[in-house]
Image (cartoon, helix red, strand yellow):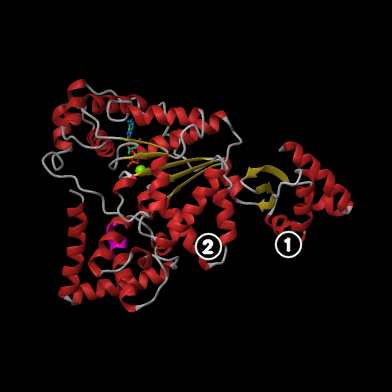
Amino acid sequence: MDRIWDDLLIHLRSNLSLFEYDTWIKGLKFKGVYGDDFVMIAPSPQAQQHLQNNHTMIFTNGLLKVSGGKKLNPVFIFGAENELDTPNLNPRYTFDTFVVGSNNNLAFAAAKAIAEDPTKYNPFLIYGGPGLGKTHLMHAIGHRIKENNPSARILYVTSEEFTTELIRAIQNRQNESFRNRYRHVDVLLVDDIQFIAGKTSTQEEFFHTFEALYKANKQIVMTSDLHPQHMSTLEERLKSRFIAGLSYDVQLPNLETRVAILKSKLEADHVQMDDEAVFFIANIRDGNVRELEGYLTRVLSYSQLTGEPITTKLCEIALHDIIPKEVSREITIESISEAVCMYYGVRMEDLVSNRRSQNIAFARMVAMYLCHTYTDKSLKQIGHYYGGRDHTTVMHGRDRISTMAKEDPSMRSAIEDIIKSIRRSAN
Ligand code: ADP
Ligand code: MG
């Protein structure tokens, strides 16, 4: 392919003026071939626009000539490139910081094998309950591929981000650049894929993204809270493709693994704690790793604030309110949206859209109010999630519902019911 690029440059040099060649072609870099797309990176958005508008034809003809008759589409991209050079991966989430136990050893081994040899298993899916290391393993794959191959283009997104970007692209008529962003990567990491289930246009777009990457032999890694077989609203064609690759689950860690995880976190933070206290924390609950980390943070900060050494007694005091009680699913923008949809009988795709019919708009205002009250999302983030609205719209919605809640008992009980249903669905 590098030869095709060299030959193409020769073709362009003899078909463009020296001025044009120097101005527009010299700064252009060849990225790779993705299916039928011959992808090049322009040094600026202006260059990208100019090349696309004025020189697509000459590139198309040149490619046809130098590729020996294979039809390749020239694609000029910009922007996503810099971002993909330093993928948005959490630096803490590496294979080295992941504690392996009987609950996750197969997922771990497969993740490592894929990181060392991408597309060995494609797609790769990690599934299991919350807080069990799915995102951690996914980032670890990204880090390792980047270490082995610094020029690999790695894109990490949550499926909500994919959805909101898609909605925005459709609104702004930028489907083309949306596609270019997703279909020209070497590794696509999609977190929490379950959120696309039931969303028609997102599933449609993701299907084509998936196909394009799969056919171009690019690695796709996904995480999900369920095995695809059990996602009732996931389109069949996606289900069968997800299942066709390799999938492993992660489960709750046993006591031994919980102890090992706590010890590894303590070591990383250079904190001393005696074994009895470590076991006390590990024993509180048969819970997930995120909870366990939360307990540890509480204990450490309590000890710091009071200046007292970490003992079992101190753990008991610091965690007194947790020890007997249930720990429920966090209230998140997603769980709120799901519960609001159920409560008002609205479809998720409508809730996150910009449709204005009365019942949808009302449900959306309630969702915005709840997100503002119960999550730490900003007005801007909330607006972005619900159909790309600006923060003043969110503010008006929130104020209206909060006024209604003060004046109207049935509004208050609706809000309570929705919150209760989120807490209940956690157990
Ligand atoms: P999930 O994506 O499954 O909800 P995460 O990957 O976000 O879970 O993990 C939650 C937290 O627990 C993260 O801080 C992660 O680093 C930590 N964690 C989970 N599993 C492990 C493990 N096996 N070893 C070390 N840390 C872990
Ligand atoms: Mg996760």
Left or right, 256 with reference to 126:
left
Reply above or below: 272 against 123.
above
Q: Residue at x 53, y 62 (%)?
A: 169
- Tell me, yes or no, if residue 398 can be seen here: no
Q: Residue at x 32, y 70 (%)?
A: 365
| Extreme residue toward the front, this view | 69
- Tell me, yes or no, if residue 108 can be seen here: yes
* Distance CA(mark 2)–CA(mark 1): 20 Å
> Could you tell me the amino acid type at mark 1?
Asn
Q: Which of marks 1 and 2 precedes in the sequence?
A: 1
Left or right, 410 with reference to 401:
left
Residue 219 numbered mark, or none: none
Q: Depth check: give the residue in front, 38 or 241.
A: 241
Q: Give the residue number, with chain letter if any, for mark 1.
A: 53
Q: Which residues are magenta?
A: 370-375
Quadrant containing ligand 2 reads top left
User: SS for tag 1?
Assistant: helix
Name which quarter of the figure residue 133 lies in: top left
Q: Quadrant of the N terminus?
A: top right
Q: Is residue 151 magenta?
A: no
